[in-house]
Image: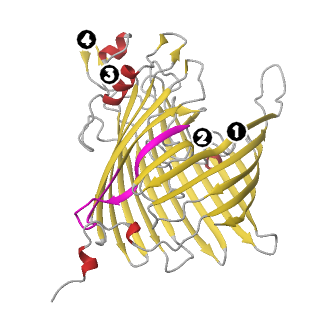
């Protein structure tokens, strides 16, 4: 007896199958309107929206664009891109001297091009990225790069998706890449900040019912010009210092530690899957404490994000479920140094003494939105469910967070948040998709507020070719 030749494919890739798909060009338009009580809109209406929904209690957005989706994985090359322009009208900030005035802004929601050459991906422009296990629609946000902030302009070269390693018959997969980005928000403290990001990951299991994966990410804010310290190093030598996380530059802090603001991120995930269902358990861990320790062995090993996501396609009424627990209260202890002794604690997640804007972009945390610069000691629970009931696609989310401020400025607050979202595509109404989201915050962190987000979306085919 012998196994089929296909079972011993030494390098299984989609390009081995016939390419029968077509390329297409789509148009896209969306209008949304938000209104709420309170000083800010409820948190679950604006977090993890790539910065597209305002934090103000009253706002409206209009987005139009052209999208070319990637559609041909069996071809040796594929490409995609988008141009989506957004305009926003929102209420202004109340001041002691004047009533708030409406503010109008315009920005590119997406402006990017991506090409895949066999297994290598090259991306340039403004495009959302998400690094995490589970379902992006059912998460409180990954620790390192969630969908909370506006996408950073970048160039990325690497292998974006899990890809079979040659010669191992698909039982080991890998991915990895390197990014250079420009943090164009130009904070008041540092202008022209640059972004370095590299990642690598491996997954064992392939088509087996159990897969185990591990990812490591290193991000660094470097370069730019500080209003206090001047030139922070923008040449190739400074880039290599950021790349290798080594000391350098002209400042005492950078010479003692590492040049730039560095964050390490690790994720360990377990997938158990069957026909039409999948369960993913994951553990995320960040490190701001010098040399990276293996996940679970650092000084701040008590901190992290633990989650489980379940999805299935047999019964549409409940197609996905997620539970996550986030803890960032330890931070390697309360003291970095005291009385001449260096303890290595007070990691002060996402903050930095030189890059005072911290791990943010246009004022929004790039990682988990449960964390903020003045509140990075958090214990939070997230639960979410989604499904489709006779064409009405829904999503229900609930969160509960206990906040302790920072070690330098401790303060306690709590927040309970709920979101109910329903979307329906109505073919008889020009094939428009209507959406309605109701949300509320209750507690001392943001105050009590209630809000509603209404949206109309239209997407259609321009041409196939």
Can residue 266 be seen here?
no
Q: Nearer the viewer, residue 11 or 32?
A: 11
Q: Which comes before the other along the chain, label 1 or label 3?
A: 1
Q: Nearer the viewer, residue 239 or 202?
A: 239
Can residue 324 be seen here?
yes
Mark 1 residue element: strand
Q: Which comes before the other along the chain, label 2 or label 1?
A: 1
Q: Which residues are magenta?
A: 153-175
Compared to residue 5, the image places residue 393 above or below, namely: above
Compared to residue 8, the image places residue 297 above or below, namely: above
Q: Which mark is residue 340?
A: 4
Magenta stretch, overall SS: strand
Mark 2 residue element: loop
Judged by depth in the image, the label closer to the viewer, 2 or 1, is 1
Mark 2 in CB contact with mark 1 (< 8 angstroms): yes
Look at mark 2 in the image and give the residue it sits on: 150
Q: Which comes before the other along the chain, label 2 or label 3?
A: 2
Compared to residue 409, the image places residue 47 above or below, namely: below
Q: Is residue 125 magenta?
A: no
Packing grade of label 3 (10 A; few <14, some 14-19, many >=20) is: some
Q: Which mark is residue 336?
A: 3
Q: Residue furthest bottom?
A: 1
Look at mark 1 in the image and give the residue it sits on: 107
Judged by depth in the image, the label closer to the viewer, 2 or 4, is 2
Image side of residue 147 versus residue 306, left or right: right
Q: Disc 2 and disc 4: Cα gap in Å?
A: 42 Å
- Residue at (73% x, 44% y) in the render: 86
Residue 2: % across, % down: 17, 86
- Residue at (31% x, 29% y) in the render: 244
Q: Disc 3 and disc 4: Cα gap in Å?
A: 10 Å
Image side of residue 449 versus residue 148, left or right: right
Residue 8: % across, % down: 23, 74
């Amino acid at each position: 007896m012998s196994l089929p030749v296909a079972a011993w494919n030494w390098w299984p890739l989609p390009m081995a199958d016939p390419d029968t798909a077509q390329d297409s060009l789509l148009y896209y338009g969306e209008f949304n309107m938000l209104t709420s009580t309170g000083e800010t809109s409820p948190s679950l209406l604006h977090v993890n929206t790539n910065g597209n929904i305002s934090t103000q209690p009253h706002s409206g957005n209009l987005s139009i664009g052209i999208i070319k989706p990637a559609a041909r994985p069996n071809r040796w090359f594929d490409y995609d891109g988008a141009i989506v322009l957004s305009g926003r009208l929102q209420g202004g900030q109340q001041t002691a001297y004047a009533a708030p005035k409406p503010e109008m802004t315009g920005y590119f929601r997406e402006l990017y091009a991506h090409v895949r050459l066999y297994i290598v991906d090259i991306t340039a422009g403004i495009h959302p990225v998400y690094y995490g296990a589970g379902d992006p629609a059912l998460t409180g946000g990954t620790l390192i790069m969630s969908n909370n902030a506006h996408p950073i302009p970048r160039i990325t070269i690497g292998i974006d998706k899990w890809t079979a390693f040659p010669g191992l018959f698909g039982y080991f997969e890998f991915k990895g890449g390197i990014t250079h980005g420009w943090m164009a928000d130009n904070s008041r403290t540092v202008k022209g900040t640059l972004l370095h990001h590299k990642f690598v990951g491996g997954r064992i299991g392939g088509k087996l019912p159990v897969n185990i994966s591990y990812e490591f990410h290193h991000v660094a804010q470097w370069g730019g010009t500080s209003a206090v310290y001047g030139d922070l190093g923008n040449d190739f030598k400074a880039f290599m210092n950021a790349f290798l996380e080594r000391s350098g530059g002209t400042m005492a802090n950078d010479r003692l530690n590492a040049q730039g603001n560095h964050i390490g991120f690790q994720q360990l995930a377990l997938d158990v899957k069957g026909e039409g269902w999948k369960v993913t358990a994951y553990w995320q861990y960040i490190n701001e404490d010098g040399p990276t320790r293996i996940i679970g062995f650092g000084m701040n090993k008590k901190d992290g994000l633990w989650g489980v996501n379940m999805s299935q396609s047999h019964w549409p009424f409940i197609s996905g479920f997620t539970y996550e627990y986030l803890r960032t209260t330890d931070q390697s202890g309360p003291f970095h140094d005291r009385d001449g002794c260096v303890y290595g604690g007070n990691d002060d997640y996402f903050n930095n003494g030189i890059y005072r804007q911290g791990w943010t972009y246009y004022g929004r945390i790039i990682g988990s939105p449960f964390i903020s610069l003045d509140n990075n000691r958090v214990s939070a629970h997230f639960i979410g469910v989604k499904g489709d009931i006779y064409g009405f696609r829904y999503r229900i989310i609930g969160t509960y967070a206990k906040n302790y401020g920072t070690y330098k400025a401790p303060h306690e607050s709590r927040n309970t948040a709920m979101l109910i979202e329903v979307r329906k595509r109505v073919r008889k109404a020009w094939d428009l998709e209507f959406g309605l989201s109701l949300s509320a915050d209750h507690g001392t962190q943001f105050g009590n507020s209630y809000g509603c987000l209404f949206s109309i979306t239209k997407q259609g085919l321009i041409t196939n070719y």
